[in-house]
Amino acid sequence: MSALLNRPFVKMNGIGNEIVVLDLRADPVPVTEADARAIARPGAVPFDQLLALYPPKTPGTEAFVKIYNSDGTEAGACGNGMRCIAALAAKSSGKNALAFETTAGLILCAVEGATITVDMGKPRFAWNEIPLAEEFRDTRMIELQIGPIDAPILHSPSAVNMGNPHVIFWVDDVNAYDLARVGSLLENHPIFPERANISLAQVKGPDHLLVRTWERGAGLTRACGTAACAAAVAAVRTKRTGRKVKVSLPGGDLSIEWRASDDHVLMTGPVETEFEGRLNQAMLATA
């Protein structure tokens, strides 16, 4: 029997990115891969990411956060999920400035009404930090394509780590591709030893991007905060936009700023609480 039986949860979303929050700070128990996969099943509490809050490891932080994809694997970062837990923590504590810790490091959040800004930290560009399986001196454009050699469907993406590995293919129309098919193939390409999030990005103007994402471990998603950040950073690096952009995803818009002063990426957007409940045996069944 799962140790999560009868534990309370909150179902939320960040512009359509489906999030489940488990607050385990008072009585910590592990979340297994099987638990995460079971909860994510249709008929249970389907999610893109599950965020489990544990007692803080670092003084001054609200919690140590473990992040699980719907396939049970762990992620280092989830921008939309961080906005969700910041909203919950602000409501319960009255604070509007909060800090959390994940396996990717400390994440600072600022809450102003229904709008939450998350400091996603510094992007990483070195091939072995993303990571890639082989060396590329310039990750603004790496050698990767899908389709015939003389007429590839997609090619030459930008690569960046925003707590998770991301690649961004620049296209004229983000809706002109079967992302469910190519995303699955590319996520598991041998060049990505830890797999990767696959995004299509379209430049609408110097301060506006359209992005669709196949999320590592979760599949097609209506929104991915780290992908929005990765696309915004890659757009600056390839001289496609300025440092502050609106990123439009299928679920809504995020404001992304890559700050020149300290190299940090700030993500701003809303969250929504859908419902609360308790995990029951049916939700946790793994058969």
Image (cartoon, rainbow, N blue to C red):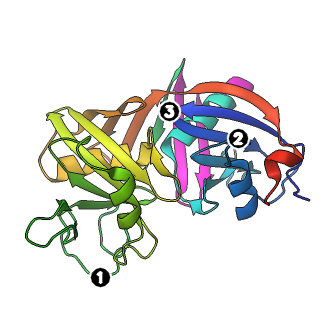
Q: Kindly identify which residue carries mark 2.
A: 45
Q: Kindly identify which residue carries mark 1.
A: 134
Residue at image x 26%, y 33%?
A: 245
Residue 176 figure quarter: top left
Residue 110 lies in the magenta stretch: yes
Marks 2 and 1 sit apart, C-alpha to C-alpha, by 39 Å
CB atoms of marks 2 and 1 within 8 Å:
no
Discs 2/3, front: 2
For the N terminus, give its image quadrant: bottom right
In front: 223, or 233?
223
Name the kind of residue labelled 3 in the image: Gly
Q: Position of residue 263 (x, y in %)?
A: 31, 50
Residue at image x 19%, y 41%?
A: 173
Residue 233 lies in the magenta stretch: no
Bounds of the magenta segment: 89-113
Number of other residues with Cα within 10 Å of mark 1, as a class: few under 14, some 14 to 19, many 20 or more: few
Residue at image x 77%, y 38%?
A: 9
Q: Position of residue 93 (x, y in %)?
A: 72, 28
Point out which mark residue 16 bears.
3
